[in-house]
Amino acid sequence: MAPHTVTLAGNIDSDGFRREARALLAALVAPDDVDWVIDPRAATQRFSRPAGLSAPRSASAGLTHPLVPRSFMSLCETVILHNAPLRFGLLYRLLWRLVHEPGLQYDPRDRDRVQALHMAQAVRRDMRKMKTLIHFDVVDDAPGAEGLYLAWFDPDHHVVEAVAPFFARRFAQLRWAILTPERSVRWQGQMLEFGPGAPATAASDGLGRYREVFEKQAARHPPAVNSDRGSAPARSSRPDSAP
């Protein structure tokens, strides 16, 4: 059988994964028959989100099943932030096996379960690093404006959107921005604005890269206000794909 190709809207498109996994499971499509890919346009997405909305949204909603334990739902939410391309295939395989092999949830040595747990641990460790190791420098980005607190960080996983609300709460009264190779974020008092990543040279030319990401590019492509991930729906090659 030819594989079913599912194109997710971004690296942490939990909504798309949830929707497609639910449809694939209902259609009895085995994990080996599914290819999960990321839309290459994801790296250039720009969007804003109110600080009160944490990310990512739970990947568990819509995946509930009498044979799927709640612990899997939480695990799924975290593992999606890992940088391994195999993560979506691994999670769908675990979902499939939990439904078709009920005893799996009682096997702590299962290879798939152990791998997913290790991936979740790596993501949580990366989130802690981002919260504790980031160093902000104050730069003058505009005459008469309050200083901009600017930082560069290179996370191991896709954690920027998940950690950004932490900084918005902690530094709510400041103007700040964090540049990373994959995704950048800034806060100007009301909304978290996400933009493309910045190259490693941002560590030494932060203000220039900040202006490129959030001023020059934003002028050409204003960010959309989006409370649901800021991403388009996943696309599937299946003719009966869920809308």
Image: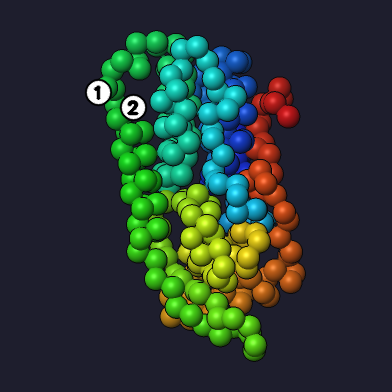
Name the side, left or right, on which 154 lies relative to 33: left
Whether tag 1 and tag 2 are in contact, CB under 8 A, the answer is: yes
Q: Position of residue 92 (x, y in %)?
A: 48, 27
Hey, which residue is sitting farthest bottom in the picture? 143
Query: Which of 85/82 is in front?
Result: 82
- CA gap, disc 1 and disc 2: 7 Å
Please name the residue shown 61% across and 36% down the image.
15
Of helix, strand and loop, which one carries label 2? helix
User: Which quarter of the rendered picture does the C terminus lie within?
Assistant: top right
Q: Sort mark 1 into few (<14), some (14-19) or many (20+) by Cα contacts within 10 Å.
A: few
Q: Sort mark 2 into few (<14), some (14-19) or many (20+) by Cα contacts within 10 Å.
A: some
Amino acid under disc 1: Arg
Query: Which of 13/64 is in front?
Result: 64
Can you say whether 118 is above or below 173 in the image?
above
Please name the residue shown 69% across and 26% down the image.
241
Residue position marked by numbered label 1 in the rendering:
109
Amino acid under disc 2: Arg
Can you say whether 231 is above or below 240 in the image?
below
Of helix, strand and loop, which one carries label 1? loop
* Residue 160 appears in the figure: no
The numbered mark at residue 113 is: 2
